[in-house]
Image (cartoon, rainbow, N blue to C red):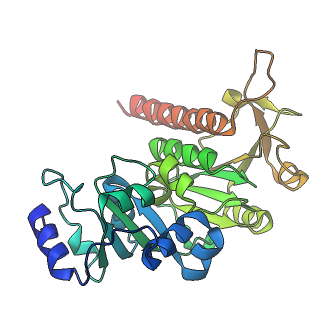
Amino acid sequence: MYGFKELLTFVFIMQTQDTITSAQNPRIKALLQLQQKSACRKEQGLFVVEGRRELMHCLSKGYQADTLFICTEILKAEQEYDNLLAVMPSCKCIYVSPNVYDRIAYRGGTEGIVATIRMKQHGLDTLPAPSQGHAPLYVVLESVEKPGNLGAILRSADAAGVDAVIVCDPLTDLYNPNLIRSSLGGIFSVPTIACNSTECIQYFKDKGIRILTAQLQDSSLYYDTDMTLPTAIVMGTEATGLTDRWRQAADAHIRIPVLGILDSLNVSVSAAILMFEAVRQRQGEISEEQNRMR
């Protein structure tokens, strides 16, 4: 078990150079490139995590830290860093001044830590197998473009206990810093898969997963649709909706009633409504079973 004092000891033992005081330093420039450019992240196999909460979520899910950028003036002794060292034994440490930290940190209150992390694979072959007797619940997003929307959906998926979020034909990088921030670490706590629509549809067909597409046309109200079976809720973009490929593959089409003038909800709001309807139905089924057993 390691605490804050051990972390500080590690920090000063591992220090191999003076504190970086200029944002023009090559290491700082390289870090900013990772934050700003998807191509750099893919080429190096690294992404950036800022702040203790997100870093702990990340490390707890088996990610490997590559480099820590630490501002000791901001790092507070009262903060909890138990187990941090144990999960990143080979991590490099680089020390930065407060003005440099302001340059590399998006948020001010992130405890003085920014880290580069090694990427993982996110193919369908990494999808965890559901436990026996459990009806998995998946959320599928076709061609999601806005990192903030995906991040918000991941937060809701974590709260709803969704088995995985699958991003088909993605238009955004899963390690986009805006996505990581908006998900509050949900990108690490919820299994997240990136694949194309064709292989995803085939996977669901092979596994007996019921496909429910959210669409306005030829659809039933979402609360009239059974979501207690193994289910994939499929969402399209706000601009164009789902492609015909998903519409044709669906076992049922569902919609959320909209009573106002505007004809649609934000995709993250819609996804949250549908996820928690599945939770409601499944919890109700458990309650009914418990009542029958009394």
The residue at 31%/75% (across/down) is: 94
Q: Position of residue 257 (x, y in %)?
A: 74, 22
Q: Judge from the rendering whether residue 259 lies leftward or rightward of residue 188; answer left or right.
A: right
Q: Nearer the viewer, residue 219 or 11?
A: 11
- Compared with 43, 201 (above or below) is above
Q: Which of 94 and 239 is in front in this view?
A: 94
Visible residue check, residue 229? no
Q: Quadrant of residue 219?
A: top right
Q: Position of residue 294 (x, y in %)?
A: 34, 29
How many numbered marks have been drawn onto this rendered protein structure?
Answer: 0
Q: Report the residue that reaches farthest toward the top.
A: 260
Q: Judge from the rendering whether residue 72 lies leftward or rightward of residue 290; answer left or right.
A: left
The residue at 21%/57% (across/down) is: 73
Q: Where is residue 285 in the image (x, y as percent from the top left)?
A: 51, 34
The residue at 52%/32% (across/down) is: 280
Q: Judge from the rendering whether residue 234 lies leftward or rightward of residue 65; answer left or right.
A: right
- Compared with 217, 151 (above or below) is below
Q: Quadrant of residue 201?
A: bottom right
Q: Quadrant of residue 43?
A: bottom right
Visible residue check, residue 142? yes
Q: Position of residue 84 (x, y in %)?
A: 23, 67
Q: Which quadrant would the N terminus be assigned to in this image?
A: bottom left
The residue at 44%/60% (across/down) is: 104
